[in-house]
Each structure stands twice: as structure tokens, then as C-alpha cells.
Image (cartoon, rainbow, N blue to C red):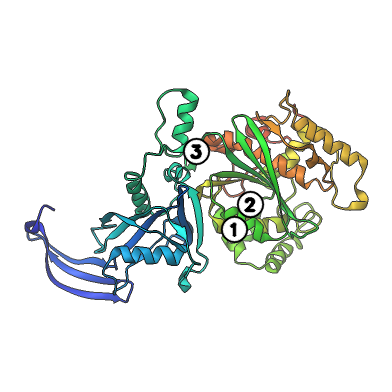
């Protein structure tokens, strides 16, 4: 609107909800043309402040916290509401920065004061740039901020992630972009890499994620972190969750380090860690469609897993047991299509290899973490998780030779020989026996683990690395895959529907 001649006349107004956080009122309005609008709802909030905080070594100070309306944990800039006693937005910004992060700066620069939603909200967002911030205190969080964590990311990483949803608050994205107009010129990583590779013009720094249907992909470029996780339903010192961390540079997947988590805390902490990364996890992400529809659970992946998350482990165990007991032999535990095709165990299995309990402990944590699950559920596109199955690749490399056993008395020299052969074929610098198109560089000592967990985690990382190379075509998941059951990513499974639906009897596909 150009001026006061175009403002609406408020005939009367009534308050509907009012407390210290919000005032919802209903106005009866008349436009300059005489049109009467009643009611027109207006939300009166306190003004907000947001701080783009930069450390002396050019790290951006961010916070990760749960946002109930979105139902997600989001990565954001430090921010908060102005109190009724606040007269200076900068003072409020300094307070919020200190309370949420423990960081302080000598000088703050005002960036803007903008309306977040001028059609319905009265408040403004005051954005500030804080340079050379240093940590001087512990966090001082309000009760509703319990669980808020501080994360530092390089400016380049933040900029490269803006187009893929790294920062979940639109107002904070605007503040960060404004800050970049006054900070010294800094090329995002993707732009620098593209320039150095091509020798030509740089690519746009804020490229959108590539899509196939509704599947988002990670940004390209060298240095992608790739993880492989050998999972267990009961982690302990004797049987931890084993994670192999790798780095993908061009066509080479290089081992970086190994993590062993003796409780689920390490695993959930990993899922919450900042991207970009991709991980292959060795447990079934879903149940069979036949089981879900027969037992009457919600018929979407998110709905069924949310239902499972509402059960205790004992209740889940009892539900699967009561389903199985009255059924005829051969019809007690159902496999997914991908399980039948690869010789995998039913995700209802509770004994022997308790794949059902692995599903229970793993799938609900995936849902809670808001990672991106191609085919199953859209999430944070900088943290991508795919289902891996090392047995598929292991059989391709050494046939059906047994290469591991958790029981010490049953671990043999033949197992060790098989593991060494598996490793040597996987890491063969000449031939691509894995079909992944990747050169694998890892220490041969991984094959010395008699449980096979370290080697299995490496195989999962190879499958995840291959899936990353297929990110523009659904991460290697065929278009006909079932979005309720899920899919295992592996080069041999990409064209499974064209192969007649099974590879489980093939011992060596190289």
C-alpha cells in the first residue's frame, strides 16, 4: 500500500486469546472502496531478534532445538523474543546470544528490521551480525529450551546448505544472507570446487537439490562423508554398534576411522550430527506389506513406525508373537519383496538373528531423528540414510563362504581366510568386483575382527557410497520399490525388477 489513503479503517476489534506470548484479535475492517471484512484475524507477537554470530576463525554459531509446530528438530541461528521491558533490540539480541550459546561479542551490527508476515502479524524481526564472538559462559536455558545444543559450522558449509534446507527457519536464512552482504567476500565451497575443476565460470553457490519425483539429493562434490553401520538390537561392550566412517573423493572411498557405540546414545547422537553425509545402515527399515495390512497397523511407513514407536519393546515383542502363533507353518513370518529377492530374513523374526528387534530399535530412531529416507520419508536432505545389507555384496565377492561368527569357540581359520579374501576382492585396485564403481582404500586389519562387524560396516559404507553416486536417480532405488516396505541399496538390485525379482541364488555376479 502506498500510504494512509489506502489503509483500512478498523470499525471495532475484539481480543480472542491473550497472554504474554501472543494476542489474537478479530478486527472488523472497511477498505477504501467500502468493502467490509469481518472478521480479519491479526496476531500480535513481541518483536523477535536473530543473531548471525561468527567466530574469529569464521565458524557460524548455530543452535539445534525442537520446534513443536513443525514437529522437528531444526538447526537455526540464535534468536528469541523481546521482553516487555526491552527498549533496545540490540540488548535483547546480546541477551539471547549469551543465554542460548554462552557466546559474546564486542560489537554488534544491525542488519535489518523486517516483518515476518505483514498480512497477519504486527511484529518485526531485528537481525544483527556479531563478529569475532567468543564463548564466555555456560548456556542459561529456559525450561522449554531443554535439549537445545550449540553447533559451530564453517561459513562455507552453511552457505552451501542453504539451498538444501540446512537452516530450517526462513527468517534466519534471510538474516544469514544479509550478513553475507557485509562480511568479506567468501566463495562457497561448491563454487570454489567447481571453478578449480572446470577452469571456467563458477556454479551458482546456492544450488537447489536435484530431484526425481519427491526425492531430494545431497549436493555433489568431493569430500562427502560416508558411513556404514553394522547394527545390533542390544549394544554392549561385548557387541557394540560398529560404524565405519569414510570419505568419498571422486571415485575413491577412503576409510577414515571406526566408531564403536556400546549404547544407543552414540547411535542417536550420530543421527543428529550435522550434515552433509550419507549412511548405510544394516537393519530393515520397514515390515512387509502383507504383515502391516493383516495386523491392521497404519498403511504408510511413517504411520506404521510411529505406531511401533508408541509400543514398549515388550509390547512389540508380544504383538509379533501373538500374530505368529495361530498361523500355519510357512505363513508365520512374512518377508518383504526385497528380502525374498536377496535371501534376507523376515523383519518379524524375534529369535536367532532378531531382525524384528533390530527393526524396532532402529526404525523408530530414524523417525525421531528427521533424517532423509529416500522412498520412505522426506527429512533433512543433508543427512541421508539408506538401508544396506552387507550379505548381498559379500556373496557377490566370495560366494556363500561363511566368514564370521559371534561365538568365540566357533571362530575358525577358515572364517579368517574368507574375510581376507572378501577384503582383497573388495579393495582390488584393478577390478571392480563390488560393482560399485568405486576404488576402496581401507586397512586390511578390518578383516581381522572375527565377528565380521568391522568388515560388514565397511560393506555398508560401500553400498552407501554407491547410492550417493545414484543420488539424482533416487539413490539407486528403483521407481517400482514399495514405499511401505523399503529397499536395500546395492548395485545388483537397481534393475532387480528387470531381472525377474531375485538374485538370492546367485553366488558370484562379477
SS class of the residue under badge 1?
A: helix
Q: Which residue is mark 1?
A: 305
Residue name at image x 60 percent, y 37 percent:
467
| Number of on-image labels | 3
Residue in front for this viewpoint, 147 or 288: 147
Q: Which residue is mark 3?
A: 219
- Whether residues under marks 1 and 3 lie with C-beta atoms below 8 angstroms apart, the answer is no
Q: CA distance from mark 1 to mark 2?
A: 8 Å
Query: Is the C terminus in the top left, top right, bottom left or bottom right quadrant?
Result: top right
Q: Nearer the viewer, residue 464 or 213?
A: 464
Nearest to viewer (mark 2 / mark 3): 3
State which tag comes first along the sequence, 1 or 3: 3
Against 245, is 356 above or below? below
Residue shown at the point (45%, 45%) measured from the top left: 155
Rate crowding at label 2 as few (under 14), some (14 to 19) or many (20 or more) other CA atoms within 10 Å. Answer: many
Q: Is residue 106 above or below residue 498?
A: below
First of labels 2, 3 by sequence position = 3
Name the spot of residue 94 as percent of width and height, x first.
37, 64
The residue tagged 2 is 286
- Residue 159, picture quadrant: top left
Determine contact: label 1, label 2, CB under 8 Å: yes
Q: Is residue 152 left or right of residue 96?
A: right
Residue at (66, 68) in percent of width and height = 312
Residue 369, image x, y percentages? 56, 56
Crowd rating for badge 3 (residues with CA inside 10 Å; few <14, some 14–19, many 20+): many
Amino acid at each position: 500500500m502506498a500510504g494512509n489513503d489506502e489503509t483500512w479503517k478498523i470499525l471495532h476489534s475484539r481480543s480472542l486469546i491473550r497472554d504474554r506470548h501472543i494476542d489474537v484479535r478479530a478486527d472488523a475492517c472497511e477498505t477504501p472502496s467500502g468493502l467490509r471484512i469481518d472478521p480479519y484475524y491479526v496476531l500480535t507477537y513481541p518483536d523477535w531478534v536473530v543473531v548471525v554470530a561468527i567466530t574469529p576463525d569464521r565458524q557460524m554459531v548455530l543452535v539445534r532445538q525442537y520446534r513443536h509446530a513443525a514437529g522437528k528438530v531444526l538447526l537455526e541461528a540464535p534468536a528469541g523474543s523481546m521482553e516487555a521491558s526491552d527498549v533496545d533490540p540490540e540488548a535483547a539480541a546480546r541477551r539471547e546470544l549469551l543465554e542460548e550459546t554462552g557466546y559474546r561479542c564486542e560489537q554488534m551490527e544491525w542488519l535489518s528490521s523486517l516483518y515476518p508476515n505483514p498480512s497477519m502479524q504486527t511484529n518485526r524481526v531485528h537481525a544483527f551480525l556479531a563478529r569475532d564472538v567468543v564463548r564466555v559462559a555456560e548456556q542459561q536455558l529456559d525450561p522449554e529450551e531443554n535439549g537445545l545444543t550449540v553447533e559451530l559450522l564453517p561459513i562455507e558449509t552453511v552457505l552451501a546448505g542453504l539451498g538444501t534446507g540446512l537452516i530450517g527457519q526462513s527468517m534466519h536464512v534471510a538474516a544469514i544472507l544479509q550478513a553475507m552482504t557485509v562480511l568479506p567476500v567468501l566463495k562457497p565451497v561448491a563454487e570454489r570446487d567447481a571453478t578449480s575443476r572446470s577452469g571456467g565460470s563458477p556454479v551458482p553457490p546456492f544450488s537447489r537439490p536435484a530431484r526425481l519425483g519427491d526425492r531430494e539429493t545431497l549436493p555433489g562434490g568431493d569430500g562427502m562423508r560416508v558411513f556404514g553401520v553394522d547394527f545390533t538390537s542390544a549394544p554392549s561392550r561385548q557387541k557394540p554398534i560398529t560404524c565405519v566412517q569414510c570419505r568419498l573423493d571422486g571415485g575413491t572411498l577412503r576409510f577414515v576411522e571406526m566408531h564403536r557405540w556400546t549404547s544407543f546414545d552414540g547411535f542417536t547422537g550420530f543421527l543428529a550430527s550435522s550434515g552433509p553425509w550419507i549412511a548405510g545402515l544394516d537393519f530393515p527399515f520397514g515390515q512387509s506389506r502383507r504383515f502391516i495390512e493383516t495386523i491392521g497397523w497404519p498403511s504408510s511407513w511413517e504411520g506404521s513406525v510411529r505406531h511401533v514407536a508408541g509400543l514398549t519393546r515388550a509390547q512389540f515383542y508380544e504383538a509379533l508373537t501373538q500374530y505368529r502363533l495361530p498361523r500355519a507353518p510357512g505363513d508365520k513370518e512374512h518377508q518383504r519383496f526385497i528380502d525374498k529377492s536377496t535371501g534376507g530374513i523376515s523383519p518379524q523374526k524375534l529369535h536367532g538373528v532378531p531382525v524384528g528387534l533390530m527393526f524396532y530399535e532402529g526404525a523408530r530412531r530414524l523417525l525421531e531423528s528427521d533424517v532423509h529416507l529416500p522412498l520412505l520419508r522426506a527429512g533433512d536432505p543433508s543427512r541421508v540414510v539408506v538401508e544396506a545389507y552387507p550379505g548381498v555384496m559379500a556373496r557377490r565377492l566370495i560366494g556363500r563362504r561363511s566368514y564370521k561368527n559371534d561365538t568365540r569357540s566357533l571362530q575358525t581359520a577358515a572364517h579368517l581366510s574368507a574375510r581376507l579374501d572378501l577384503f582383497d576382492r573388495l579393495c582390488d585396485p584393478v577390478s571392480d568386483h563390488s560393482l560399485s564403481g568405486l576404488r576402496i582404500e581401507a586397512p586390511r586389519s578390518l578383516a581381522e575382527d572375527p565377528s565380521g562387524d568391522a568388515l560388514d560396516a565397511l560393506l555398508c559404507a560401500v553400498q552407501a557410497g554407491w547410492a550417493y553416486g545414484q543420488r539424482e536417480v533416487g539413490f539407486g532405488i528403483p521407481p517400482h520399490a514399495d514405499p511401505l516396505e523399503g529397499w536395500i541399496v546395492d548395485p545388483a538390485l537397481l534393475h532387480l525388477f528387470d531381472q525377474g525379482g531375485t538374485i538370492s541364488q546367485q553366488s558370484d555376479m562379477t
